[in-house]
């Protein structure tokens, strides 16, 4: 689904790369940043946060989405940029959300009654690709499977 990079996408990827600088990743040494574009065009960011008990670590996407939810804006996410690479290094390999994050993005998409676009890039470089969350996680399980409708819009 990759077309030409628009200024909106470039801004979102740049915000994710800036967020990546704040990653707490002393164990994997792999920093990930995420930036959410909200319906009002604002941006909310997050970085991965590792823990000595590895299972308690948080992905950047989860941190950003939880922040949006904490602000009452879970249903307002329209797109997300995800970037990552080695701490202190360069890396132009495109990073995509893990399976857990795809499920969490799907939850936000269903609550917002929209298909969130996911822009994926490396820590550096010009390479990027965009996917809809429905393409990244086909046949997803979410709120609709439990009979929960999206939040009513104000």
Image (cartoon, helix red, strand yellow):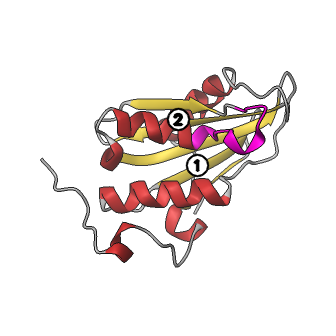
* Residue 102: x %, y % from top left: 58, 58
Residue 17 in the image: above or below residue 108: above
* Residue 103: x %, y % from top left: 54, 61
Is residue 75 rendered magenta in the image? no
Q: From this viewpoint, which residue is outermost toward the front?
A: 53
Residue under pointer 1 = 119
- Which residue sits at x=74%, y=38%? 84
Q: Earlier in the sequence, mark 2 or mark 1?
A: 2
Task: Determine whether, in the image, residue 70 is placed left or right of residue 139.
Answer: left
Mark 1 neighbour density, 10 Å: few (under 14) some (14–19) many (20 or more): many
Write down the region rendered in magenta: 50-61
Residue under pointer 2 = 12
Q: Nearer the viewer, residue 73 or 56?
A: 56
**Quarter of the figure with residue 50:** top right
**Which quadrant of the rendered structure holds the N terminus?**
bottom right
Q: Are marks 2 and 1 in contact (CB under 8 Å)?
A: yes
Q: From this viewpoint, which residue is outermost toward the left?
A: 154
Is residue 52 rendered magenta in the image? yes
Label 1 sits on a secondary structure element that is strand
Residue 1 in the image: above or below residue 97: below
Label 2 sits on a secondary structure element that is helix
- Which residue sits at x=40%, y=58%? 109
Q: Which mark is residue 3?
A: none
* Residue 117: x %, y % from top left: 49, 55
Marks 2 and 1, how far apart at CA: 8 Å
Q: Nearer the viewer, residue 117 or 6?
A: 117
Mark 2 neighbour density, 10 Å: few (under 14) some (14–19) many (20 or more): many
* Residue 38: x %, y % from top left: 36, 39
- Which residue sits at x=39%, y=37%? 68
Task: Determine whether, in the image, residue 84 is placed left or right of residue 111.
Answer: right
- Which residue sits at x=52%, y=40%? 9
């Amino acid at each position: 689904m990759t077309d030409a990079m628009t200024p909106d996408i470039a801004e979102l990827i740049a915000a994710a790369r800036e967020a990546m600088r704040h990653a707490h990743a002393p164990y994997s040494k792999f920093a990930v940043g995420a930036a959410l574009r909200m319906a009002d065009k604002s941006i909310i960011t997050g970085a991965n946060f590792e823990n000595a008990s590895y299972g308690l670590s948080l992905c950047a996407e989860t941190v950003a989405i939880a922040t949006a939810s904490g602000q009452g804006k879970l249903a307002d996410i329209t797109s997300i940029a995800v970037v990552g690479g080695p701490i202190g290094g360069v890396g132009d390999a495109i990073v995509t959300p893990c399976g857990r994050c795809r499920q969490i993005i799907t939850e936000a998409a269903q609550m917002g009654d929209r298909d969130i676009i996911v822009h994926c890039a490396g820590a550096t470089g010009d390479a990027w690709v965009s996917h809809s969350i429905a393409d990244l996680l086909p046949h997803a399980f979410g709120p609709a499977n439990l009979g929960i409708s999206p939040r009513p819009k104000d």
